[in-house]
Image: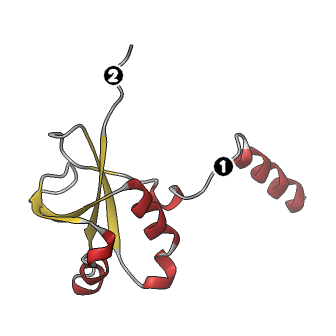
Amino acid sequence: MAKEKMYRWFIYPMDGEHTNKVLSNPQHNNTFFEGLSATDQAQRIPVWECSREFLTQFENGRKGNGVKYRVYVQESKYGKLKPYPFAKNLGKKKKPGADLVKKALEMKNQK
């Protein structure tokens, strides 16, 4: 049986104090790391480790809470952090082929 991959989720605050304040709330149970290596950064970056569930809720409330951040994912316990470009879609479930249907409708409306 194939071994299931383990992923860890991190948030890198980009606006300084405000995002850190939101993430440091004790009820969120996030863990702060002073500096971890990321594949797209020359230096180590300060990040908050969080659960996937928290990240989904955080993403869904992104517009309302005025925070700026990047999401990183780490495969296994010792890998480098990789940017997770699909963070905005974490809470959304897409139907297969939804993009194709949307494009077809747009093309039809343009005619």
Give the position of the C terminus as an image quadrant: bottom right
Label 2 sits on a secondary structure element that is: loop
Residue at the image point whose x is 24% and y is 79% from the top: 20
Query: Looking at the image, which residue is at 37% across and 17% down?
Result: 2
Q: Is residue 109 left or right of residue 87?
A: right
Q: Residue at x 22, y 86 (%)?
A: 17
Dot 1 surroundings within 10 Å: few (below 14), some, or many (20 or more)?
A: few
- What x and y, as percent, mark residue 63? 50, 80
Element under label 1?
loop
Q: Position of residue 94 (x, y in %)?
A: 66, 49
Q: Quadrant of residue 76?
A: top left
Query: Which residue is at the front of the view, 2 or 79?
Result: 2
Which tag, 2 or 1, sits closer to the chain's start? 2
Label 1 sits on residue: 94
Q: Badge 2 is on which residue?
A: 3
Give the mark toward the camera: 2 or 1.
2
Residue 21, by quadrant, is bottom left
Q: Amino acid at mark 2?
A: Lys
